[in-house]
Amino acid sequence: MKKAMQVLPKITLKQLSVFVSIYQTGSTSRASEALHLSQSAVSSALTELESRLQMPLFERVGRRLNQHPNAHPIYIQAQAILGQALTLEHYHKHQAGQIHIGASTTIGNYVLPPLLAKLYAALPDAHIDMYIANTQEVVSEVEQLNIDIALVEGMPRPADMKVIEQRAWRTDALIVFAKRDSQWLKDVAAYNDMDKCYELSIEQLAKLPLLVREAGSGTRQIIDEQLLKHLPDAEIVMAIQQSEAIKHMVSADIGLGCLSQHVIQAELTAGALVQVKVAGIDLSRTWWLVWHKARHQSPIWQSFIDILTED
């Protein structure tokens, strides 16, 4: 039986690197600076790549380069190929390990630090990069192959489910809370001494001012799906990007808040803030692990997964 001839690719890593840099910077001049190549070499590499692919990647409008619809899927594949090539080139460094971890705001600020401590304890020479933002922004970075693995709140909603892997990781609960002796709860809510919380009906909560996270955050997703759908006429005072800001505003008695139990646990324990239980409302949620299927799963990646699954 005749052995099949191996076909060598004609696309080069240099061509892919040039394309990725142009895609990220928006111009050949900025790409040439980033790659320390001449502008003519950058332009030539892009032309050669488009010729090999037999498709345009950018549309030339005067001196500007506008991304062609073909560019994005090629960019994703190029990022994966370059990442794997770098891993192979620096394989000995990956024995110590480097990893890019993304986390939504609550997880990144309150839950991830002790997990990173465990990772450093297992791999003292590990190189860890962090990206903390709201869930929507973090998942977008995973799609762009800029993050190896992400920990997010709420159900991830990637644009392309075919390339994203997601796994349920942990459960959490959001808590409606207020300042102790808040003006908003006076003569409105009953205080339960045994459970150390105020108790409200849905109708009563709808009449009180609420401070919530911004659209795109995992916390806001759960608030929309499990709380606000019962409160069509709720008075949302403002949407805020930072959980700490909401906590401080509630402490100033501007309104009631709704955040993860992890964010306000210390204040609840100290008695500065108090939980407000709403009859008939369940604000439990699932936290998720998310990664791109094309992302190389290095030894440190697996070590981090092991820490997450044993926690």
Image: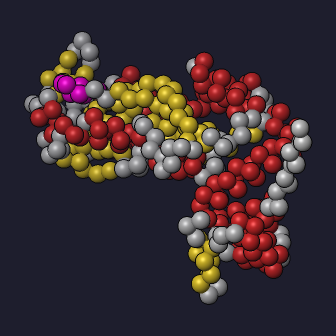
Judge whether residue 209 is colored magenta.
no
Work out whether residue 132 or residue 30 is closer to the camera in this orientation and state it.
Answer: 30
What residue range appears in magenta? 275-281
The image quadrant of residue 75 is: bottom right
The image quadrant of residue 36 is: bottom right
Residue 186 spot, x, y in % from top left: 14, 32
Work out whether residue 206 or residue 84 is closer to the camera in this orientation and state it.
Answer: 84
Specify whether residue 285 is in view: yes
Specify whether residue 247 is in view: no
Residue 83 spot, x, y in % from top left: 74, 48
Q: Is residue 103 above or below residue 123?
A: below
Is 78 positioned to the left or the right of 283 in the image? right
Judge whether residue 277 is colored magenta.
yes
On-image quarter of the N terminus: top right
Q: Is residue 53 above or below residue 259?
A: below
Work out whether residue 100 or residue 259 is closer to the camera in this orientation and state it.
Answer: 100
Residue 264 spot, x, y in % from top left: 40, 31
Residue 118 spot, x, y in % from top left: 67, 24
